[in-house]
Image (tube, grey):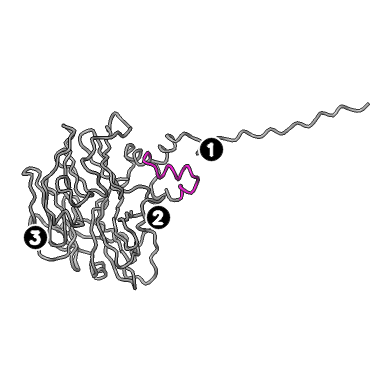
Amino acid sequence: MDSEVEPPQKKKKPNSSPSFVSLPDVILVNCLARIPKSYYPKLSLVCKSFCSLILSMELYVERLYLRRHEDVFHVCLQLPDRRLPSWFSLWTKPDQTLTNDIGKKKKSTRNTLLVPIPSSYSPRVPMFIGEIGSELYAISKHNSPSSVMWVRNKSTNYAWRKAPSMTVARANVFACVINGKIYVMGGCAADESTNWAEVFDPKTQTWEPLPDPGDELRLSSFKSMEVIEGKIYVKKSYTMEYVYDPEEDKWDVIARAFMIERKCEIENVLYRCRGKSCSWYDTKQKEWRDIKGLATLNRYRRSYVIEVANYCDKLLILWEIFAKQNKNIWCAVISLKRRKDDEIWGKVEWASIVLTVPSSYVFLRCEVKPV
């Protein structure tokens, strides 16, 4: 008698665990926001959805909301082969020891670079983010003109909503906050004398025009805008600054002796780079004093200093050196320490070539913004 043979059973496939990318976007964004930005280029290669989220406004907002944002150094350049200005941001390769390449013959490690925006390295053109009370206000600095301003309540509302629009569309705008009001300048047609500069009052929710500073400023590609002691300083050139006083509602012009110098403030101390030296202003002695410990750096960067900036409470210096038909843009980050003898000493944490550009390029401005 033949024994009965049981039919073979089909092997059951083990239940595959759900993948990370199958999670809802809101959870993915929350997770990505907690990861340092330096890892985003590699994460963007994982899949299309990751790449899309890394480039999204939602991730930008989530990083601000979770206070996981990082201060990022941006520069705006006019390149000869492009009609519109180009934005770049400083990117540092993760898990690398940064080196001081000054005076070394070997090629730069390229562990720090100025990378184009938008890209997986730096997804968004920097925005103006102004904080007034419990509200955050945002204005894009993109090359496409827009009159839109966004607002979000920090404590009760996660979503951004449109605030009252500026009276004219602006591209690559300059903006700042003084005494609870938002001031914007430029980015529109130079003949917009009535609305070239305006101010927004959150209490009345209205925009009002500022006095016309004159053709000379409006028609120029001014370099920078900063707030010092409640006044707005607009640098038109190396020898001239325009100053707007909100209290008196008027413009003044300050002419300076011709000397190429760049200034920034770090922890209530004013620093500058000019010629072959970097110095700080001693408010007690009312004089400029050299930063100690930077002799090698000062000898090497004898060429033109492009800009200096407060980068995470450290002194960042950009300068350029000719390289055949191009220019190499160098960057150095310097930590600062005041010693008992009341001298300030600097230590170069790293320095390297961060970008090579055509020699005919034009530097427009730089900014340090939370991203």
Farthest right residue in view: 1
Location of residue 62 with respect to 233 vertically, above or below: above
Name the quarter where the N terminus is drawn: top right
Question: Residue at point 38% right, 46% down?
Answer: 36
The x, y position of residue 361, in whole percent, is 29, 64
Q: Nearer the viewer, mark 3 or mark 2?
A: 3
* Mark 1 crowdedness (10 Å alpha carbons): few <14, some 14-19, many ≥20: few
> Residue 255 bears which disc, if any?
3
2 vs 124: above or below = above
For the point 22% across and 56% down, the residue is 337
C-alpha span from label 1 to label 2: 28 Å
Pointer 1 or 2: first along the chain: 1
In the rendered image, is residue 229 in sight? no
Q: Secondary structure at mark 3?
A: strand
Q: Amino acid at mark 2?
A: Lys
**Residue beneath disc 1:** 19
Q: Which residue is mark 2?
A: 93
Q: Nearer the viewer, mark 3 or mark 1?
A: 3
Q: Earlier in the sequence, mark 3 or mark 1?
A: 1
Instruction: Say if residue 276 shows up in the picture.
Output: yes
Disc 3 residue type (three-letter):
Ala
**136 w.r.t. 112: above or below:** above
> x and y percent of residue 290 in the render?
16, 63
Tell me which amino acid carries mark 1: Ser
Q: Which is more N-terminal, label 2 or label 3?
A: 2
**Front-lying residue, 119 or 312:** 119
- Residue range in magenta is 42-58
- 250 relative to 13, above or below: below
